Image (spheres, helix red, strand yellow):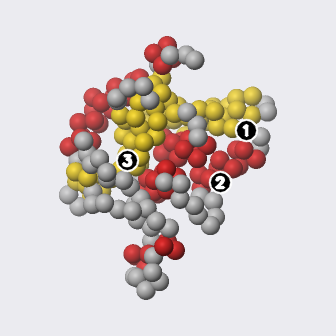
Amino acid sequence: MTAATETGLVPMRVSKAVGLQNGDEIFEYIVLEERDGDRRLAIQVGHAEAFALAASLQSLGWNRPTTYEFTGALVRSLGHRVREVRMDRIVDGAYAATVEVEGLQGTALVDARCSDALNLAVIADTPVMASVEMVAEFIGRQGRRFRRGRAAPPRSCRRPDDHPQNEPVAQQLPCAGIDQSEGAS
């Protein structure tokens, strides 16, 4: 196995989805932890992406496949596998990823948003790597802002059919599905 320092990539593990509250706004993040170290990387994502990740990490099942489950099944049905997800660059101020897919005709590199690539990595049980530059950039710039946030009120991740039928419609929808167990430390 090649050492991360030789490739410029840091092995990471998708840890959780969290929400940080700033005033009335809640910002959702996917948190990654270094596999063989203590560095973390938090990537701001949308509500749907945070919910999907939290549901996958909690092994929640649905009646029909989610978008990411469908994508993983589609890749497998074509005789391919997601080999690795690399968060390898910053494009227009946003983190970007490359998904390495291996199949009958060889290997392909597919450009992706980090939120989509990380959700697919969890579904496909695929290794996740982050560039050394991306980890350093987060620690230097975004890390300070992330640590200043305040954890949002606790929420659970549940399916819509787990709610009583007499609740108002807005309350029947699944909530953000984010974990606040560690807050904003």
Q: Does residue 140 appear left or right of residue 161 in this picture?
A: left
Circle 1 crowding by C-alpha within 10 Å: few under 14, some 14–19, many from 20: some
Q: Residue furthest bottom?
A: 166
Q: Earlier in the sequence, mark 3 or mark 2?
A: 3
Circle 2 crowding by C-alpha within 10 Å: few under 14, some 14–19, many from 20: some
Answer with the quarter of the image where residue 163 lies.
Answer: bottom left
Q: Mark 2: which secondary structure?
A: helix
Q: Residue at x 46, y 65 (%)?
A: 158
Which amino acid, mark 1? His
Q: Does residue 80 appear left or right of residue 159 in this picture?
A: right
Residue under label 3, please give it.
29
In the image, residue 151 lies at what x, y percent? 26, 52
Q: Residue at x 47, y 83 (%)?
A: 165
In the image, residue 3 lies at what x, y percent? 50, 16
> Dots 3 and 1: beta carbons under 8 Å?
no
In the image, residue 44 lies at what x, y percent? 37, 45
Distance Cα–Cα, label 3 vs label 2: 23 Å
Q: Mark 3: which secondary structure?
A: strand
Which amino acid, mark 2? Phe
Distance Cα–Cα, label 3 vs label 1: 29 Å
Which quarter of the rendering shows the C terminus?
A: top left
